[in-house]
Amino acid sequence: MSRRLLLIVGGACALLLLVTGIMAVVLVSGGSDSGDSAADAAPTPVANSKGAIGLTVTFFGTAGGLRVTTVAPGGPAAEAGIHVGDVVRSFDGTVVRTPEQLRRAVEAHNAGDKVPVTYERGDKELRAEVKLGAAGDGAGVEDAPLPQSSSGPVQSRGRLGVTIIQIDPQVQERLQLRRDEGVAITNVVPGSPADKAGLHMGDIVLAVGRTNITDVAGLQRAILDVPINESVDLRIQRGAGELTITTTLPAQTNLEGLENLIPPELRERLQALLDSGTLPANQLQQLLRLYQARIENVRVGRVKSVNPGFVPPTFVVTYAPYSGGADVSTELRGNTTVRRGRDVIQPADLRPNEFIIVLSQDGGQSAFLVLAFGGN
């Protein structure tokens, strides 16, 4: 009897263990499914993801700060209200002076951090709280290269102290300009007249004095025409508004920015004379203005011969034009001024193969001024 009882009790225990095991399997399986769903709904975040602000910047003259050149659409900077053309002064309370400094400051924070940024827009100082994005989501901070125009290279600095470019659709998009034509400033040289007057990258030059500006060459000519140390009004468009800035321009001290206006060999000759002190800056300025004022009646070439004219004291100089083509003979009358550097010389002193500029009022048949540069 006791043996039968033991068998019954043992069987009951075995059955209980079997049922318990099945229930455990079911519970474990159900728990696993629930855990997978939770994981799918909330993936593990990446720890300490570097922050990103979503803009590009470039240096901004001697005043310091960083000019914003592009803003990523929908990015942290855009969401905070920062625009192209704004000047970033500080990030999280620290003054930033270089793109690399700003980049390091941004990446020292994590994605999602809210950081104060101080910036300027025109004459106003503004403050924004930027919620940083993740570095992998878009541009962090980039030092913006100068845009390239499909119509030609970026032009050099010249008297005003800026680099300029002809606006085309690519430049308009790159600088986010409101005009699709004209001339835009792409950089301002520190300490230049443009810098002191407050010109900014992205400004569009509309007029110099009373001269309207539509292309690079027009702006170069207008700047050349401004008298030395006399003030001139520059009308510009900045963003949606227009303003007038007054500045004073010194004499032209180099030949930068005149690539479209003066032949390369003449630029080299003039620059060499300027560097050696043979040609003072104020004389260079007068020469360039005269050259531009009479550009249709200006000839540049190399002397082939100088002979007495039929009626003394006239001479005839024959030269090979720089632009090519047939030789040109020009009459030098008694009242024709011939200069070599600072010196006034006689027509007979012109040398074969000497580089000359002939300025005339009748297309080159007779000259009122000949500028000689010596050399072979």
Image (tube, grey):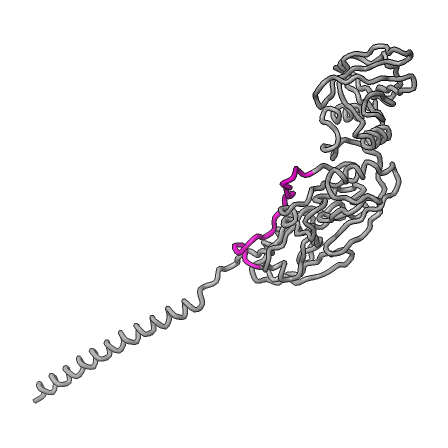
**x, y percentage for residue 59?**
69, 46
Can residue 212 be seen?
yes
Asked which quadrant contains residue 332, the reply is top right
Depth check: give the residue in front, 245 or 96.
245
Residue range highlighted in magenta: 133-154
Residue beneath the point at 83% across and 37% down? 225
Task: From the viewer's side, name the closer residue of 69 and 298.
Answer: 298
Q: Quadrant of the N terminus?
A: bottom left
For residue 8, above or below residue 290: below
The quarter of the picture where the C terminus appears is top right
Q: Nearer the viewer, residue 120 or 287?
A: 287
Q: Is residue 173 left or right of residue 329?
A: left
Where is residue 200 drawn, in percent x and y? 74, 48
Q: Position of residue 340 (x, y in %)?
A: 84, 19
Q: Residue at x 59, y 62 (%)?
A: 113
Instruction: Please give left or right for residue 226 compared with residue 61 in the image.
Output: right
Residue at the image position 75 percent from the left and 20 percent from the top: 301
Please tell me whether the stretch drawn in magenta is mainly helix, strand or loop: loop
Q: Name the residue located 92 percent from the left edge and 19 percent from the top edge.
A: 335
Asked if residue 262 lies left or right of residue 100, the reply is: right
The location of residue 316, given as percent across then percent down, is 83, 14
* Direction bottom: furthest residue: 1
Q: Is residue 41 above or below residue 186?
A: below
- Any magenta on residue 141? yes
